[in-house]
Amino acid sequence: MLAERHKTFHALHQQGCFVIPNPWDMGSARMMAASGAVALATSSAALAFTLGRPDMGRVTREESLRHAEDIVRATALPVSGDFENGFADAPDAVAETIRLAAEAGLSGCSIEDTMMVEGNPAYGFDLAVDRIKAASDAARSFPHPFVLCARADGVMNGAYDLDEAIRRVQAFEKAGADLVYIPVPPGPEELKRIVVSVKAPVNALAAGPLTALSVGEIAAIGVRRISLGSMIARVTHAVIAEQMDAIMKDGDFSKLSAAASGSRINAMLAAGADRGDIP
């Protein structure tokens, strides 16, 4: 069954455009599957929130792998792992993370060029490329497809400009990345620059200025995959904050009327599970 998921995931990146939502537990994974998702991806930030921790480098590789196994088991959909910087600086250690990701049943994985320290600095260019080359070599050693997504996060983190980001993803493509990703470019025109700068498929994040565009409009730019990152988790947490403010500060329960019915949630969980291998 996993072999078919891996083939399906690889095929999704060959043509067209699809949305890959990011669950944070088995329930959200099943609800996303029931809503028509064709693939899922973990979110390092959403997992950190679930564990009661801030985002960025606060979750271990072991925790992320266990979480990935849960998401893989939740539905029959292929799953990609958001594994930050690969939980390591050295290329060989990043390659080991890729091997462990495949053992967890993941059909792909993303690796950032961000050092998980204060200020989110980027790895030097040469080391960043070497890390992706090592990850790609590991991914190519498997008997099945494994989609390696190479991320250049410096625009989002303020570590470098778009020209440098494009230089990096071009080098990542040459190093063997199957998919490249520059999160949160300034706008649609900059996203177009990214798409035409490489031959590899491009992932875009539905965040910042790109939330003003529809799936069709992003697809028309040439993007192959649209990820939601931690955005659905953040919307969920915004609802928690809003509801608790109303209750604890104002004594107002009226906003609770917007809650989804238990029957609707139960139906979606059942439908999502029907697409999985757990009763």
Image: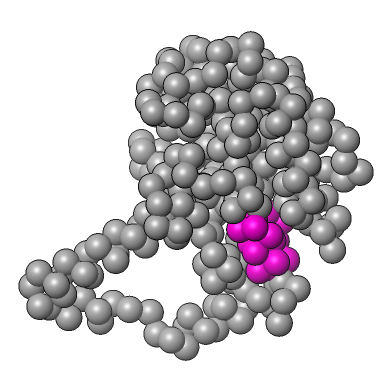
Q: Main secondary structure of the magenta part?
A: helix
Q: Which residue is at a point 40% across and 57% down the rendered structure image?
A: 52
Instruction: Assess whether residue 243 is covered by the magenta stretch.
Output: no
In front: 10, or 114? Answer: 114
Compared across the picture, whether 275 is left or right of 228 comes to right
Q: Which residue is at a point 58% across and 12% down the rendered structure image?
A: 125
Question: Which quadrant holds the C terminus?
Answer: bottom right
The residues colored magenta run 66-79
Can residue 206 be seen from the camera position used here? no
Q: Is residue 270 above or below residue 8?
A: below
Outermost residue on the bottom side: it is 263
Can residue 74 be seen from the camera position used here? yes
Q: Which residue is at a point 87% across and 45% down the rendered structure image?
A: 144
Instruction: Estimate the x, y position of residue 163 in percent, counting from the top left.
Output: 49, 12
Q: Is residue 184 above or below residue 216?
A: above
Question: Which quadrant holds the N terminus?
Answer: bottom right
In front: 225, or 231? Answer: 231
Q: Is residue 195 above or below residue 31?
A: above
Instruction: Assess whether residue 75 is covered by the magenta stretch.
Output: yes
Instruction: Estimate the x, y position of residue 187 in percent, counting from the top left.
Output: 39, 28
Q: Is residue 278 above or below residue 186?
A: below
Compared across the picture, whether 161 is left or right of 20 comes to left
Instruction: Estimate the x, y position of residue 84 in percent, counting from the top left.
Output: 56, 38
Outermost residue on the right side: it is 143
Where residue 206 sits, quadrant-wise, is: top left
In front: 174, or 18? Answer: 174
Q: Which residue is at a point 75% across and 45% down the rendered structure image?
A: 100
